[in-house]
Amino acid sequence: MTDSTPDYRDSGLEFPAGFLFGSATASYQIEGAVTEDGRGPSIWDTFSHTPGRVLHGHTGDVADDHYHRLDADLDLMQRMGLEAYRFSIAWPRIQAEGTGRPNEKGLAFYGRLVDGLLARGITPIATMYHWDLPQALEDEGGWRNRDTAFRFADYAHHLGEALGDRIHTWTTLNEPWCSAYLGYGSGVHAPGVANGAAALTAVHHLNLAHGLGLQALRSTVTRPETQYSATLNLHMIRGDERAEQASQEEAIRRIDALANRAFTGPMLRGAYPADLLQDTASVTDWSFVRDGDLEQIHQPIDVLGVNYYSTVTVRMWDGHSPRSTADGHGDSAGSPWPGSDDVEFVEQPGPYTDMGWNIAPDGLEQLLMDLHEQFPELPLMITENGAAFPGDEVVDGRVDDPLRIDYLRRHFTAAHRAMQRGVDLRGYQVWSLMDNFEWAYGYTKRFGIVHVDYESLERTVKQSGHWYSELIRTRRIPE
């Protein structure tokens, strides 16, 4: 018997057999070994070594040293009972300069990772691109350069040949919104470019890479049950109820076009939204979209990955009062919202995580419902959800993190409610398996359900990790 509560702290909720419980990481955030075994530099190596770009000058040079601790980390996943592990492959570990013959040592590392997962009964979910573009490709323009999409297809071909017989689900891109708008629009992520036209150009070339990459994979992977996907950080956008209805609706439409439909339009419908093109006409004429591109992008996928952390609240700016920019992505030289300088992002009520993001499990339920209504035949998977909170310290061999347990409990409840309402949700990958390099925040934000001591690199499963193990074992949200 379930007890549905307004705060999403329900009890007695059980998940069906086949629902895939796992956890997720990204290569640059955990691997380290950035100059070993033929790996070339990525844009995040360059960015993190540029003074002023990352808090405290932190870099991913060592990170969690997962590259050297692979077997121990795999054993840890097995002890925790993970059913799936979503990892990303470092492109510059496979092709140091983003082109040419693949690096056999790089392929061998991921081969050992995948084989180790399978030997432990853990399902491999591989992301081909989680932001670590080879620096050599950025030197040629990066995602502003159309050729990068074709280089990505070559890279995908190599991965399909080497690993295609063993991967359960291939994901082309992780959060292309961040790659484009934070990397080339606001400049708070690598490569640190702040230019609206560059950001929109990157949007298209990332979309093109997705389509070309899927085709390259399908041409090489012979395993018939393989699944293909992309992961999007779709924004759950709300109107500021203090503003007029028309102001709310217009602001929501504008941001939905940039944040969500710029990707779901071409990937899932085969067209860019007309209103997106109109809204951004003062920024770019979109001449980088060539004949045939949309057909290349619009490839079938088996599941859509959904990353969710918080909501945003918007209204149209009056043009006079100080403009609020509380979009959760920090201050920057440029804007991650090209063509929408007249939209305000207003402060949202708490409580907040250590990232300053509001905690809103109802937003996850609504986002899943919205996607189900838009794309009713498309299965979904939560590929990232989790939270950073302060105070994660090892005391007598134990890390108590009740806020994270409460966060996860409420969001698993939201996912369960969406399933009860008809959403075809296939699994849930908690972010993150381990504390790690949190991009421009360095090592100051801890998302892991496993604590990492950044001096000794010792791993300690947090209480949230033990809570999650119990959920996986019983398929029931613990009381």
Image (cartoon, rainbow, N blue to C red):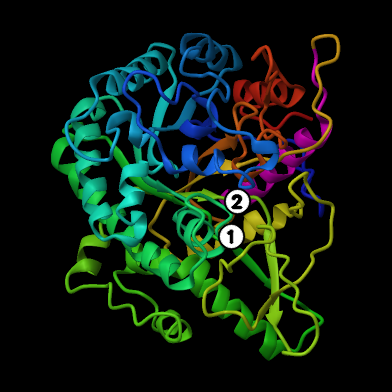
Magenta residues: mostly which secondary structure? helix
Given residues 344 and 405, the one toward you in this image is 344
Mark 2 or mark 1, which has the lower sequence index?
A: 2
Q: Is residue 320 above or below residue 374?
A: below
Q: Is residue 119 above or below residue 405?
A: above
Q: Is residue 157 above or below residue 146?
A: above
Q: Residues within 10 Å of mark 2 (few under 14, many from 20)?
A: many
Instruction: Give the residue number, with chain letter if any, for mark 2.
Output: 308
Given residues 293 and 342, the one toward you in this image is 342
x, y percent for residue 327: 68, 64
Given residues 337 and 99, the one toward you in this image is 99
- Span shown in magenta: 398-419
Name the residue at the front extreme: 51
Q: Residues within 10 Å of mark 1 (few under 14, many from 20)?
A: many
User: Closer to us: mark 2 or mark 1?
Assistant: 2
Identify which amino acid the numbered label 1 is placed on. Answer: Leu
Q: Is residue 21 above or below residue 453?
A: below
Residue drawn at 36 percent across, 74 percent down: 272
Residue drawn at 44 percent across, 79 percent down: 276
Are circles 2 and 1 on residues that touch, CB within 8 Å?
yes
Q: CA distance from mark 2 to mark 1?
A: 9 Å
x, y percent for residue 447: 68, 35
Instruction: Give the residue number, with chain letter if any, for mark 1.
Output: 367
